[in-house]
Amino acid sequence: MRSRATARAGFAQLTWRESLRDIETCLASFGPKLYHSGIRQPIARSTLADANENRDWRIFADFAQVLIQQATTLYANDPFACELQAAAYALDSTTIDLCLSLFPWATFRRHKAAIKLHTLLTLQGNFPTVIIVTPASVHDVNLLDQLVWAAGSFYIMDRGYLDFARLHRIHQSGAFFVTRAKKNFRCARRYSQPVDKTTGLRFDQTVVATGLDAQHDYPAPLRRIGYRDPETGKALVFLTNNFTVPALTIANLYRGRWQIELFFKWLKQHLRIKAFYGTSPNAVRTQIWSAIAVYLLVAILKKRLHLDASLYPILQILSLTLFEKTPILQTLSQLPPPPASPNAQNHQCLLGF
């Protein structure tokens, strides 16, 4: 039962079906080939609608968690942009707009409905390890109360997560955070380390917060790093509780946070998470988790088969060959490698900050 439900959800995502009737018609066209996914009888639109309403979305979330564990094992030794002997994660959220008349349970503003996908993305493989779906009215910083912090790991987040009491809990757990300071952040400098200003670094300081609330919420010292992007000239100030990693590595870690923005963009462009097959909370969560599962399946396939192509060409090929008897490796082995862009690094510098 669960495998058939997952197969139908994956089919809709991989082939970009627009409605339940679209799914019904296209599945029926494959006839006897449906046995590949364990579907033994024609699928009616009413059956899909009932499943959307009644089949618990946690089935798909649990399946995605299994895939996350597999992907974590496969990508465990993958290097990423920064030479860092620790795991690094980017934390952010994206908003998905909904029609208020169809999704009244997702009230955001007076005339608008929306939900948020709060995501923790590992920078080793660039896939999500935690996904939490909430109404869009839930502030990002509240998610810091729901996460478990792994000691020794780095968590990169923007200023929307700047809450000193919550950051101090991360510090007490033995994990490290990297975020940006707000303009009104007040502090007293204790020490200054020399920096190479030709790299874009401006200063590397040990500070303590002097604001009444900040000092109470975060009594420990902080590291304050100034950086000016050589390409754009934009000045940035970072806050972290790590005092051993080189200052330039901290700046490059924050640059890596852009990977989560690219993940959100990829998800919205290539999978179905902006238009939904049902209007209930269960239907919406089911579709989101099935999209995450498809993303993870493609990432796992890429790694296991040692493919050089990016995820999108693999997704395109799979959408056309789902019910073919040709081995997947044979089908995908002829994919061309991604084109090299001489300006890729410059684009990353521009977008990452």
Image (cartoon, rainbow, N blue to C red):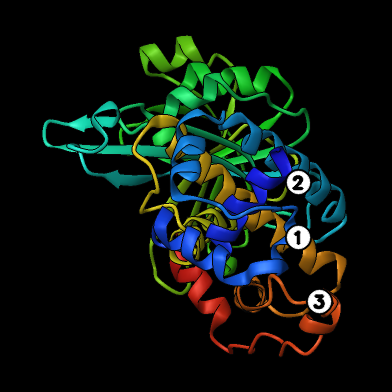
Residue at the far top in the pictured view: 216
70 shown above or below 133: below
Neighbours of disc 1 within 10 Å: few (<14), some (14-19), many (20+):
few
Q: Position of residue 283 (x, y in %)?
A: 44, 37
Neighbours of disc 2 within 10 Å: few (<14), some (14-19), many (20+):
many
301 shown above or below 166: below
Out of 296 and 87, give the one closest to the viewer.
296
Secondary-structure class at tag 3:
loop
- Name the image quarter holding the C terminus: bottom left
Left or right, residue 336 beside residue 70: left
> CB under 8 Å between callouts 1 and 2?
no
Marks 3 and 2, Cα distance to the nearest angstrom?
24 Å
Secondary-structure class at tag 1:
helix
Q: What's the residue type where badge 1 is placed?
A: Tyr
Residue, disc 1: 35
Task: Place residue 232 in its image quadrant.
Answer: bottom left
> CB under 8 Å between callouts 1 and 3?
no
Q: What's the residue type where badge 2 is placed?
A: Leu
Residue at the far left in the pictured view: 111
Residue, disc 3: 325
- Label placed on residue 67: 2
> CB under 8 Å between callouts 3 and 2?
no
Marks 1 and 3, Cα distance to the nearest angstrom?
11 Å
Residue depicted at 71% across the width and 29% down the height:
175
- Label placed on residue 353: none
Marks 1 and 2, Cα distance to the nearest angstrom?
23 Å
